[in-house]
Image (cartoon, rainbow, N blue to C red):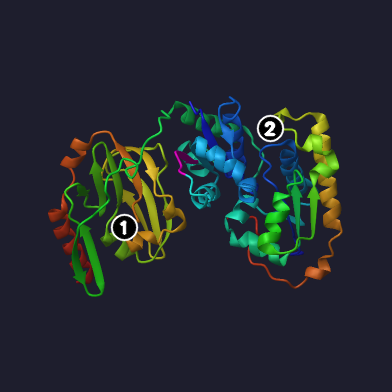
């Protein structure tokens, strides 16, 4: 059940998805055990809502890809425990949202599905890798091709797939992201679409998208498990992936379901370094 | 066809009846009473840095509709886009006690009396739109409808 949460909906008034975000938030508060945060009033007078956000886990409900509620949470430096985006949920449930702002049969069906999904997920508050006090320190090997420099972490706990994504595995958690090869190829990254918090991802399943003016890259997760956290900063500053895709530009944290099996299909630094060099040479050749 | 549009910004009003009435009255104006002449500016998007919304409010006349005397919509609009053309404080129309009612916030809980309040506020918005002179804005260019539905 969703209980003891602070709920921050986007409350958009210009799209149906925003109206749905509000409706979900209000319904979740009917049990008297959750608190709603008004996204507009929060910007005007923040003391009240800082207190609520500080005392509760935070559920963010974005209506559309503008992700106004997520941006507000990032701006206020709030830690998001769970997050949903209505338009993505609509796609998942094969429900087409109309331009009309009225909530009709389809919209109510979507609201019920989202509420069921939220209430059926275990709400245990998860700790992120940073909170578990792991030192985030990579040792890099570099490879230069023309003006491009490619760095690859050599740490034993970092695994790669041949789709140019990495996973830093610590115990039953992993942080994932893309390698320098991806960010150099994409050039200036403009948009980041994170995976949904709470989403179950298969090994080699999609875990978000990164888009530049050149193309869109689907991040292929090296590991399987549940998304427990995403790098919120990337929503506003996707260019951090260009800056350093391993540290500032990490994408998500996964609670692993079967890390030992996952590792069997992954490669370590030595192998990936050779593969990446070949890819770079092929591109330049 | 006229390109003249009035932007209407409703407060989000999550915690009280005034906010709910603000949203409903704004929608009534947009969807029924002044469909052609109005666009809504999504206040949360506007505040999150939506350039289309902010630029619209700089170029075209804008009216804010607030559920209570905190005037979140008015204050926010003025902060980012300058002076607005008019503002409505719903608590002045339906009374502060009604506007600040925290027990009734969902549409489904509204009574006929509340819907009369919606009509009353919508009427005030329409009056305010009518008081704006379109000629003062002729020739001003705005690219994009400002509704944020991209």
Name the residue carrying label 1.
A245
Q: Are marks 2 and 1 on the same chain?
A: no
Q: Which x, y percent locates residue B116?
A: 84, 36
Residue segment shown in magenta: A79-84
Left or right for B78, reference A117: right
Tell me which chain the residue with mark 2 is part of: B
Tell me, yes or no, whether the two marked residues, 2 and 1, touch with CB atoms within 8 Å: no
Please tell me which residue is depicted at 22% across the width and 37% down the height of the picture. A259
| Position of the N terminus of chain B by quadrant | bottom right
Label 2, secondary structure: give it. Answer: loop
Label 1, secondary structure: give it. Answer: loop
Name the residue carrying label 2.
B106
Q: Which x, y percent locates residue A62?
A: 53, 44
Q: Which x, y percent locates residue A246?
A: 29, 55
Q: Quadrant of residue B92?
A: top right
Please tell me which residue is depicted at 41% across the width and 65% down the height of the picture. A213
Q: CA distance from mark 2 to mark 1?
A: 44 Å
| Position of the C terminus of chain B by quadrant | bottom right
Rendered view: A102 above or below B75: above
Residue sticking out furthest to the bottom: A146
Q: Quadrant of residue B23?
A: top right
Q: How many marks?
A: 2
Q: How many other residues sit within 10 Å of disc 1, few (<14), some (14-19) or many (≥20)?
A: many
Q: Indicate yes or no whether the magenta region holds residue A44.
A: no
Left or right for A173, reference A95: left
| Residue B149 in sight in this render | no
Q: Nearer the viewer, residue B72 or B119?
A: B72
């Amino acid at each position: 059940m969703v209980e003891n949460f602070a709920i921050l909906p986007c409350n958009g008034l210009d799209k149906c998805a925003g109206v749905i975000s509000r409706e979900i938030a209000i319904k979740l508060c009917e049990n008297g055990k959750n608190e709603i945060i008004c996204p507009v009033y929060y910007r005007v007078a923040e003391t009240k809502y800082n207190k609520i956000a500080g005392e509760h886990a935070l559920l963010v409900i974005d209506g559309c890809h503008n992700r106004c509620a997520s941006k507000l949470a990032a701006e206020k430096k709030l830690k998001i425990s769970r997050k949903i985006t209505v338009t993505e949920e609509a796609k998942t449930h094969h429900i087409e949202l109309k331009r009309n702002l009225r909530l009709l049969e389809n919209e109510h069906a979507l609201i019920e599905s989202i509420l069921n999904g939220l209430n059926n997920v275990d709400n245990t508050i998860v700790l992120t890798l940073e909170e578990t006090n792991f030192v985030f320190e990579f040792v890099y090997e570099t490879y230069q091709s023309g003006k491009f420099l490619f760095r690859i972490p050599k740490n034993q706990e970092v695994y790669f797939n041949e789709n140019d994504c990495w996973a830093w595995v610590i115990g039953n958690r992993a942080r994932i992201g893309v390698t320098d090869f991806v960010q150099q190829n994409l050039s200036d990254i403009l948009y980041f679409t994170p995976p949904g918090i709470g989403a179950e991802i298969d090994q080699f399943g999609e875990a978000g998208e990164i888009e530049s003016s050149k193309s869109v890259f689907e991040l292929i997760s090296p590991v399987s498990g549940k998304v427990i956290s995403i790098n919120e900063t990337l929503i506003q500053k996707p260019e951090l992936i260009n800056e350093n895709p391993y540290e500032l530009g990490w994408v998500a944290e996964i609670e692993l379901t079967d890390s030992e099996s996952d590792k069997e299909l992954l490669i370590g630094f030595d192998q990936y370094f050779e593969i990446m060099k070949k890819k770079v040479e092929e591109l330049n050749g | 066809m006229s390109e003249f549009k009035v932007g209407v910004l409703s407060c989000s009003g999550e915690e009280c009846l005034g906010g709910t009435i603000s949203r409903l009255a704004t929608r009534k104006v947009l969807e029924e009473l002044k469909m052609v002449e109005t666009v809504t500016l999504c206040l949360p998007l506007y505040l999150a840095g939506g350039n289309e919304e902010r630029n619209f409010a700089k170029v075209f006349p804008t009216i804010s509709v607030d559920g209570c005397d905190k005037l979140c919509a008015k204050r926010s609009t003025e902060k980012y886009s300058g002076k607005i053309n008019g503002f409505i404080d719903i608590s002045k129309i339906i009374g502060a006690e009604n506007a600040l009612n925290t027990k009734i916030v969902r549409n489904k809980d509204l009574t006929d009396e509340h819907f009369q309040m919606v009509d009353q506020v919508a009427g005030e918005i329409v009056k305010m739109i009518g008081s704006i002179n379109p000629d003062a804005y002729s020739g001003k260019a705005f690219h994009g409808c400002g509704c944020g539905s991209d």
